[in-house]
Structures are given as C-alpha cells and as structure tokens.
C-alpha cells in the first residue's frame, strides 16, 4: 500500500500530463486550437522542461539556449537531406552535436554567475547565429534557411499530421518523467542546493561546478530534442531558430508559468503559443501589447507565475473547507 502511494505521489504529475497530452487532439479543437499547433506545444514543453532544470534548479539564467535548439535543428535537417530520411539517426546525431557544444560553452560560461553568465550565453548564441547567416551559409542556406528535405520517416511510417503529434507527445511525456526523476534524485537536490546557497555547498566539500555543468548539459540536450522534433514537424530550418528572440521567448514562457516547478514552464509554453497563434487573431496588431501587460501583471503580482495562482486557489479552498 505504501509503495502504491509513493508511486502515485512520484508520478502523479506525469500521469496527469500524459492524459492531457494524449487526449489533446480531442479537446484542443473545442477551444479553437488547430492541428499542428498541438504538436508545436508538445515540442516546446520538452524545451521548457529542460530549461527549467537549469534555471529552476540551479538559478542560472541562460539567454542563449536557442543555440542548442538551432544546432540540433540544422543537424537534423542536414542528416535528413544528405544521409537518411529516418528520424532516429538524425535525432541522435543532433543531440550529440548539441551536447558537445554545450559542454564547451558550459565550461567557459559557468565560471561566471548572474548577469555575466546570461550575457555570455547570449553572446555564444549570437555567434552561432552569425555563423549560420554567413560563414556556414553553404550548409545552412543563410537567410533562406535549410530547405529541400524529404518527408521525415520513422522507419516505414510517414511523419506527418497525427503521427508527428503522437511521437512528440510520447517524447514529451518521457522527457517530463525523466525530469521528475532528476528532480527527486540526489543530483537534483545538489542542483537545488546551488540555487539556495552555492557558497555554503562548496564549504561542505561539494564540487558545485560539476553539478552546474551537468544541469547545463542536460538542459541543452532537452533543447536539442526539441530542435530536432521541430524539423520533423516542419521540414525546414530557419536562421531564427538560433536568434536571440527564441531564447527570450523561452525565458518569458518559464516566468509566466512558474520557474522551478517543471509543470509551470510547460503551462507557460502552452499559453504563449496559444495566445500567439489563436487569441492574437482577434486582438490584431495589439496582441503584443496585451501579452506585455499580462507578463507585467504576472511579474508584479504573481512572481511564481501561473503555478503560484494555482497554489493560492488550492490554499483558499483548503482554508474554506477547514473553516466549514
């Protein structure tokens, strides 16, 4: 009985997310969502969960995670175009490429903290963006992007429509489960200790830099999986995948949803993408103004994002129930 309770407590969020994700094609059209947007939401859920492992656990804010997203996207595109239309080797190569780059960038940037770390990661991302636009444009396509890829295949299955959605959803569920396991592991606790008080942790003899680098690399791997899936979803790679605005959107999604909760950033991603692609149609050119006001409201009144609002509602209901 105790083991069953422990299993439910550990995997409750994963099970609920799986139910929401796998049934999304049924209920998403009821709120004016369209086919394809649900796939993009699943992909960005992966990106945001990984980003939260770095920002939410260690407190290190990266403004350059688009570098890993873009590198993986270009690697996937080149693999599909030049070697095989099977997505499995393409995704594996993309994750390896992004991971190797992340190790190098992490070793260089994690020597600094705070705004200096953030600016350094942004500088590296912009460097890769510039390379894609000029030095490597023979392979990347420059401003026109990487095109001419065949229809991605999962062995004998064409990765189009619902096939891409369910593959992305299953990947999102698995990656979220892995993130929850990391959160509850000794490694995850060390990462959170860095955020609480890195100096005190180092006084105990723990090598904090090792855990910071591990969080950075794991976060980059999540971004790489998302970048690879984006190419499977839409066989095209644009230079904006490496742009600073891509990193900025990820930061905004995390803050709106709730940093450090894993679930919150996914909610933030779903809200942002839904707002940008559905609600903006009715708002017209003013949608960015409305989004900015929402972001300001969240930062000022709900620093913990949407997850803080959920916790406040839960506490109010519990208080009301106790008083009765």
Image: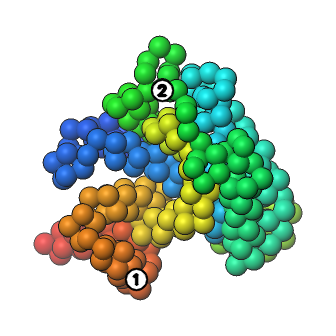
The residue labelled by disc 2 is 151
Q: Nearer the viewer, residue 185 or 254?
A: 254
Mark number for residue 296? 1
Q: Position of residue 75 (x, y in %)?
A: 67, 38
Q: Position of residue 206 (x, y in %)?
A: 82, 60
Q: Is residue 114 above or below residue 53?
A: below
Q: Quadrant of the N terminus?
A: top left
Residue at horizontal 45 percent and vertical 64 percent from the top: 253
Residue at horizontal 46 percent and vertical 39 percent from the top: 234
Q: Nearer the viewer, residue 320 or 170?
A: 170
Q: Is residue 40 left or right of residue 58?
A: left
**Which of the colour schemes (rainbow, by chain, secondary structure, one colour) is used?**
rainbow
Q: Position of residue 64 (x, y in %)?
A: 66, 63
Secondary structure type for disc 1 = helix
Residue at horizontal 46 percent and vertical 45 percent from the top: 43
Which quadrant would residue 95 be assigned to in this image? top right
Q: Nearer the viewer, residue 184 or 251?
A: 251
Q: Position of residue 267 (x, y in %)?
A: 38, 58
Residue pushed farthest top? 156
Q: Quadrant of the C terminus?
A: bottom left
Residues packed near mark 2 inside 10 Å, few (<14), some (14 to 19) or many (20 plus): some
Q: Is residue 102 left or right of residue 305?
A: right
């Amino acid at each position: 009985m105790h083991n069953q309770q422990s299993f439910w407590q550990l995997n409750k969020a994963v099970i609920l997310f799986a139910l929401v994700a796998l049934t999304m094609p049924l209920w998403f059209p009821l709120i004016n969502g369209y086919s394809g947007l649900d796939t993009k939401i699943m992909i960005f859920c992966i990106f945001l969960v990984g980003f939260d492992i770095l920002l939410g656990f260690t407190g290190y804010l990266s403004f350059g995670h688009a570098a890993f997203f873009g590198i993986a996207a270009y690697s996937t595109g080149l693999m599909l175009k030049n070697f095989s239309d099977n997505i499995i080797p393409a995704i594996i190569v993309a994750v390896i490429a992004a991971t190797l780059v992340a190790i190098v960038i992490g070793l260089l940037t994690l020597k600094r903290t705070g705004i200096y770390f953030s600016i350094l990661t942004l500088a590296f991302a912009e460097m890769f963006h510039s390379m894609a636009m000029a030095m490597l444009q023979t392979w990347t396509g420059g401003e026109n992007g990487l095109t001419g890829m065949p229809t991605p295949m999962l062995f004998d299955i064409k990765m189009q429509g619902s096939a891409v959605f369910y593959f992305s959803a299953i990947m999102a569920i698995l990656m979220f489960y892995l993130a929850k396991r990391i959160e509850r592991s000794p490694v995850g606790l060390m990462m959170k200790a860095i955020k609480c008080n890195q100096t005190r942790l180092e006084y105990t003899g723990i090598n904090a830099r090792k855990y910071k680098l591990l969080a950075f690399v794991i976060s980059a791997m999540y971004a790489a999986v998302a970048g690879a899936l984006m190419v499977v979803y839409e066989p095209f790679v644009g230079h904006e995948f490496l742009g600073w605005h891509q990193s900025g959107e990820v930061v905004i999604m995390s803050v709106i949803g709730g940093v450090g909760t894993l679930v919150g950033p996914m909610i933030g991603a779903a809200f942002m993408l839904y707002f940008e692609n559905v609600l903006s149609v009715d708002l017209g050119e003013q949608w960015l103004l409305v989004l900015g006001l929402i972001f300001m409201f969240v930062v000022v009144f709900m620093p913990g994002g949407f997850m803080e609002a959920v916790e406040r509602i839960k506490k109010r209901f519990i208080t009301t129930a106790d008083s009765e």
